[in-house]
Amino acid sequence: MLEDDLGLLERTPIGKCGLPVRPEELRKAILDNRFESLTNGRKRGSEEILAHERKGVAGDWRNHFSERIKAGFKARYGGVLVATGYERDLSW
């Protein structure tokens, strides 16, 4: 998502799911929701501790999950992360 948000999100909802949305509306929604747009121009990797959008980098969640939260998240959504390619297996 961080590397090719437009490519991935333009293909999937319209091309694969057939959602009735105009391509230009979808493109605007994607651009409006990029990290830089949501943080008034802050670059990914620049951390603001109190902001909801902390860093905007892949894997930063690991710095914020306790072992208990990680176990619960893995039990509920671990398979989804593997199926979508975010993780290779459940060893994370």
Image (spheres, rainbow, N blue to C red):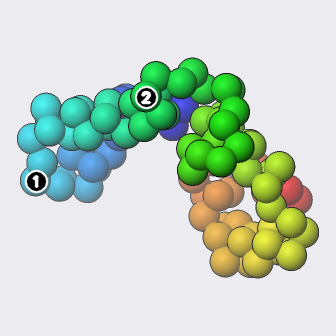
Q: What SS does tag 2 mark? A: loop
What residue is drawn where x is 83% and y is 49%? 63
Closest to the observer: 69 or 87? 69
Which residue is denoted by mark 1 in the rendering?
20
- Using the image, tell me which numbered label, if any, was put on residue 40: 2
Q: Amino acid at mark 1?
A: Pro
Q: What SS does tag 1 mark? A: loop
Q: Sequence-wise, which precedes: disc 1 or disc 2? A: 1
73 left or right, relative to 10: right
Looking at the picture, how far across and down is residue 41, in whole percent? 46, 22
What residue is drawn where x is 86% and y is 66%? 66
Residue 92 appears in the picture as rendered? yes
Closest to the observer: 47 or 82? 47
- Rounded to the nearest whole Å, what is the CA distance between mark 1 and mark 2? 30 Å
What residue is drawn where x is 79% and y is 72%? 69
User: Quick check: 32 above or below 83?
Assistant: above
The C terminus lies in which quarter of the figure? bottom right
Looking at the picture, how far across and down is residue 34, in whole percent? 42, 34
Q: Residue 44 falls in which quadrant of the image?
A: top right
Q: Amino acid at mark 2?
A: Asn
